[in-house]
Image: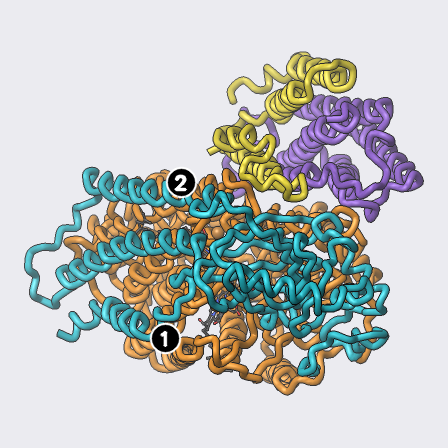
Amino acid sequence: MEHAEHGNSNAPMEYQSETGRLNILGFWIFLGAEIVLFSTLFATFFVLKNRTAGGVLPDELFEVNLVMIMTFLLLISSFTCGIAVHEMRRGSLKGVVIWTIITLLLGAGFVGCEINEFVHYVHEGAALSTSAFWSGFFVLLGTHGTHVTIGIFWITGILIQLKKRGLTPQTSSKIFISSLYWHFLDVVWIFIFTGVYLMGLGGL
Amino acid sequence: MIFLFRALKPLLVLALLTVVFVLGGCSNASVLDPKGPVAEQQSDLILLSIGFMLFIVGVVFVLFTIILVKYRDRKGKDNGSYNPEIHGNTFLEVVWTVIPILIVIALSVPTVQTIYSLEKAPEATKDKEPLVVYATSVDWKWVFSYPEQDIETVNYLNIPVDRPILFKISSADSMASLWIPQLGGQKYAMAGMLMDQYLQADKVGTYEGRNANFTGEHFADQEFDVNAVTEKDFNSWVKKTQKESPKLTKEKYDELMLPENVDELTFSSTHLKYVDHGQDAEYAMEARKRLGYQAVSPHSKTDPFENVKKNEFKKSDDTEE
Amino acid sequence: MANKSAEHSHFPWKHIVGFALSIVLTLLALWVAVYTDLSSSAKLWIIFGFAFIQAALQLLMFMHMTESENGGIQVGNTLFGFFGAIVIVLGSIWIFAAHYHHGDHMDGNPPGGAEHSEHSGHNE
Amino acid sequence: MKLKWDEFFVTGDPLILGAQVSIALSTIAIIVVLTYFKKWKWLWSEWITTVDHKKLGIMYIISAVIMLFRGGVDGLMMRAQLALPNNSFLDSNHYNEIFTTHGTIMIIFMAMPFLIGLINVVVPLQIGARDVAFPYLNNLSFWTFFVGAMLFNISFVIGGSPNAGWTSYMPLASNDMSPGPGENYYLLGLQIAGIGTLMTGINFMVTILKMRTKGMTLMRMPMFTWTTLITMVIIVFAFPVLTVALALLSFDRLFGAHFFTLEAGGMPMLWANLFWIWGHPEVYIVILPAFGIFSEIISSFARKQLFGYKAMVGSIIAISVLSFLVWTHHFFTMGNSASVNSFFSITTMAISIPTGVKIFNWLFTMYKGRISFTTPMLWALAFIPNFVIGGVTGVMLAMAAADYQYHNTYFLVSHFHYVLIAGTVFACFAGFIFWYPKMFGHKLNERIGKWFFWIFMIGFNVCFFPQYFLGLQGMPRRIYTYGPNDGWTTLNFISTVGAFMMGVGFLILCYNIYYSFRYSTREISGDSWGVGRTLDWATSSAIPPHYNFAVLPEVKSQDAFLHMKEEKTELYPESKFKKIHMPSNSGRPFFMSVAFGLAGFGLVFEWYWMGVVGLIGVLLCMVLRSFEYDNGYYVSVDEIKETERKISE
Ligand code: HEA
Ligand code: HEA
Ligand SMILES: [Cu+2]
């Protein structure tokens, strides 16, 4: 376990410690597992798609504007998150902090919209226990939303560490890993956007 | 000697057991004793596969025995065969890849053919109009409805021989499986689904049928007899039943929805006018609620039937617990 | 992996391009799905095609999937993940295609079955 | 579900009462012994908080053996009940609970942990690593598994066990038909253990990919390491499916969702689908490491290198891909279209091709070898014919049209015991005996071991071979009794006799452990059997020091250690000693798992406050971990010298 030692000082800081490299690779593998996790939820959602059991139909509730706002919030946050990593590789602590905070705010905006949306749906009579379709809907989106929420808290914690310790091989690998997580959630959202909303709105 | 014995042990055990079972057991292997074209197709497929498997097992066992006997470590007596340098042999490896591929192909072809042919009425009688029977599983009983005859039976089934029976399989509650081994393989019975299955009997006789898929407490008792009779006997049974048996009222049918065993019953009307379980998955649950049945954990001190009002069909000997 | 520091002091072109593309793809997908009258299956192919392109953009442009000494593993791992995803989603849909119609189409050739079988065939 | 307090403890069954009393007594006994010998601190700092992969491996194995006992007693009770027609040893509900817990425990809490235990002990050594990539996570994996297992196991005394089969099919497992805590135990116990398994998967993938010693290229890795790598890939890509399936069913049961219910458009079949998308890869998760173990043992005791190494690697990769393409063969009878059944029939049969390649390669590994019949080798040899019987009957099941007749019968029960026992369990025994000196410093007695082998192996065949015929005679699985007229009595009785022979075999194993602990000579060399070929035998002593290798060995070929022996390489020259970095122990994973257990227990009884408290505990542990910067510690050169000298004395 010669962690921490031999590093390649030319590489970005997050790859400089062995622990950092292992953690990043481990996290990539974890994301592989997450792909399967979400695809199982998608499979469930698609199989249950027409089973609304006489309740409210999705196209009665989905709204293009809200969906687009949420999509853009997340897309932009993914971009700003990428910029934060870019700043990190330039060695700019300030840049990392600023861009990460922007990312988190956008993420919080997204979660806010989603909570709003859910509350609205429940008022309209579409809840987890309404029908198989809505069970699938709420659990698929809820899982994604929970991931985003956890991400916000987690990254906030990393920001605090960054503040205390500055950019070190350890903190930067944490930032990098959390950025992977964040981008990944955007990837998942792309499929939610396509498979849930576009298909719902387009009546597919 | 003792070594030879040890090496051969698995073989010997197997051979011995096989003899015992072929003599004692196979004679009543219902799956291999088909009484209709569907079961026969399956039995043929099974026998074919057993042939291939015995060949494979034979090859492996023979190789195994030879190698063990020949290359065992004889203390001190080195016969010069030891050669640690071998690491592979392309020719052999190709052989034992290609032969299994061929065997898999040889098994796939009849398998696929049989799968497709089982979806249709048996070849021999395909121009005969099939008899339609709705087979519905309810915990823990089978309800058979003859829509054309307007007859319903519970826990037994009468069918004419030499005529395909088209089962419309469904369930009122848990997922069951309709299985009459001597007439053919099983298919699941599921609430909210109606699935077709063709079976046919060639010989007059009584065959055992049952639910093969675990459904809880009295699953083991969810059996029924299949009486295959001549067309003539069948028709007279139909006439007699239509005349003599009571009508099936909705109340009675609802009571059948309770999870318990009942005896054999016969009615001169079907439940199909009250509910199609192939469309309505919730009927049984609602009926139970209506009757005051309360599902409880098996370790609960509460009796689930505590509040149930009427209970005509409860099996007399079903008093345990 | 070489000359990282040099590369990274530049303007983040990669990110900007990726971002612009993803916005364009999102809007295009919306337009195709909601405001055109292509056939359903054409729409599905297009919007999911776009989704996969966008996913690839994120993975390559933002997440630097191919970089570092483990790039190969990361790519292989993600591809296997997508293989699993496709098998699970299309496989489930294919299996239940026969059950969508409450078992009325038990003739062994449910609508859409043949088409889907081709898809899973490709995934081996 | 409203729980009445008088239903909290399961009562009314003398068998269970006996179990309750013996659990209480043994708990008290353990506490007394630990206190009396002042072992609490030792237990905490040497074992509970350890991050040493070898110790964790041993902990896995001990737990697995206990679970084998529990599952085995279940099995014997079922056989006792089925020995005679209309038997009333168990009532139907008790029988249902027992086969459910038997299946679940044997697969999830016995087979997997046993293999993961052996993997933990052996694989880091085989690749010449000091530890796994994430030692802290490794400890967490163990404890989540253990807590999950315990949560599942207490069900039979508190609240009642699940009774819908290890497959937990809906709608039987729904609130409508199986109310009460039983099914919740299943859902939460498996969920918690599953998290640990997933982490193990990631951990060992990274370990094998990144922590290999110098020169250990992928194609020089020992076969057990290869099978482990591929198994971990399957774990990583299959377990999330189980996670989701369990979560969805929990939502149905606890929060009124409608994924698999009869009401509101739910789809019970979807549960079967998701369960088997995980479930089929799962059976390969428990067989691939077994293949690896047999590969090591066969080539060691035939004193020959593995025949067709590349083909072996290719075939496990093929099996891993195919394992994701066959799941429907578990529900051919669900009314799928003919094209679906045909496709999955063929993919399933295709798995026999790479498996056959392996079987023949093992046979030819022994060709022109010098085979010595030690006990590990006996198990490995017995595996070949027995597994082939299980495998070819699997192929018979794979022929969908024929499966309509075998499905849900004892033919199937026999198939899976032939592959699970002759494959996985034999491998566990073989590996356990083979690496026993690595773990405990002495061998198990060979003579007693042979008794164990013959009695268990013959008992196994006597128990399960008749079941093929029972299946063909139409005996369905999961029935708690049958009638005298069914004609199944004789074969069932024979089967029961065989089962009890296995029980006797197991007792002999236990005696052997005791006997060998007392009387076996202690091993000095790291190469206890004298036939070691891989780096796990290259350690300086029988039980490797906590840093494994004083100097990381450099590998130049396959079977690295064999060549080192031949070339008389000096493995650990003092001049090459350098300080060694090691991870520090941590008690947090233990607390985190306990919090998980608390949350699980709360949710089982729908005491949501307790669930929330537990989850907060889990989150707290995660936050603390995130803020922790523990870089481990260094073992100084002097300390290494001292340790190594002590060993060589
Ligand atoms: C270790 C676990 C394990 C393993 C390795 C296997 C291996 C296989 N299994 Fe098994 N299986 C189970 C565990 C396992 N199974 C369990 C637990 C269940 C039941 C679960 C439940 O319902 O509770 C089950 C159920 C099960 C079914 C479902 C039956 C039903 O429910 O009706 C089927 C059907 O296809 C099947 C097939 C196979 C096949 C084809 C293989 C193949 O991988 C076998 C391949 C091996 C060989 C074929 C032998 C060696 C090869 C040769 C010598 C080469 C030449 C051979 C040929 C060309 C044929 N298995
Ligand atoms: C790795 C997995 C594994 C293993 C090792 C076993 C081992 C055994 N199994 Fe198991 N079995 C399964 C996995 C396994 N099984 C699964 C998945 C199912 C399906 C469950 C379901 O349907 O949901 C099943 C189902 C199953 C059934 C079918 C039940 C039914 O459908 O009704 C039966 C019946 O004979 C059975 C028997 C046995 C026996 C006798 C053993 C023996 O090998 C056990 C040997 C015994 C020991 C090793 C312990 C020894 C104990 C002592 C020495 C103590 C002595 C004490 C007393 C006598 C009280 N098993
Ligand atoms: Cu399988």
Q: Amino acid at mark 1?
A: Gly
Picture residue at 68% right of the left edge, 62% below the top: B152
> Which of the chains bears the disc numbered 2?
D
Can residue B165 be seen at all in this image of the molecule?
A: yes
Which element is circle 1 on? helix
Q: Nearer the viewer, residue B132 or C19?
A: B132
Disc 2, ligand 1: is the CB inside 8 Å? Answer: no
Picture residue at 70% right of the left edge, 15% below the top: C38
Instruction: Locate the N terminus of chain B and report the quarter of the image it occupies.
Output: bottom left
Q: How far from the left and from the top, in percent, is residue D445?
A: 32, 76
Which element is circle 2 on? helix
Neighbour tally class for label 1: few under 14, some 14-19, many 20 plus, Cα within 10 Å: many
Picture residue at 58% right of the left edge, 48% below the top: B196
For this view, does B276 lie left or right of residue B232? right
> Which of the chains bears the disc numbered 1?
D
Q: Which mark is residue D318?
A: 2
In purple, which chain? A
Image hue for chain B: cyan
Q: Quadrant of residue A152?
A: top right
Q: Nearer the viewer, residue D388 or D396?
A: D396
Q: Amino acid at mark 2?
A: Ala
Q: Which residue is mark 1?
A: D459
Image position of D603 with respect to D12: above or below:
above
In orange, which chain? D
Image position of A123 with respect to D412: above or below:
above
For this view, does D325 lie left or right of residue B262? left
Image position of D61 with respect to A122: above or below:
below
Neighbour tally class for label 2: few under 14, some 14-19, many 20 plus, Cα within 10 Å: some
In yellow, which chain? C
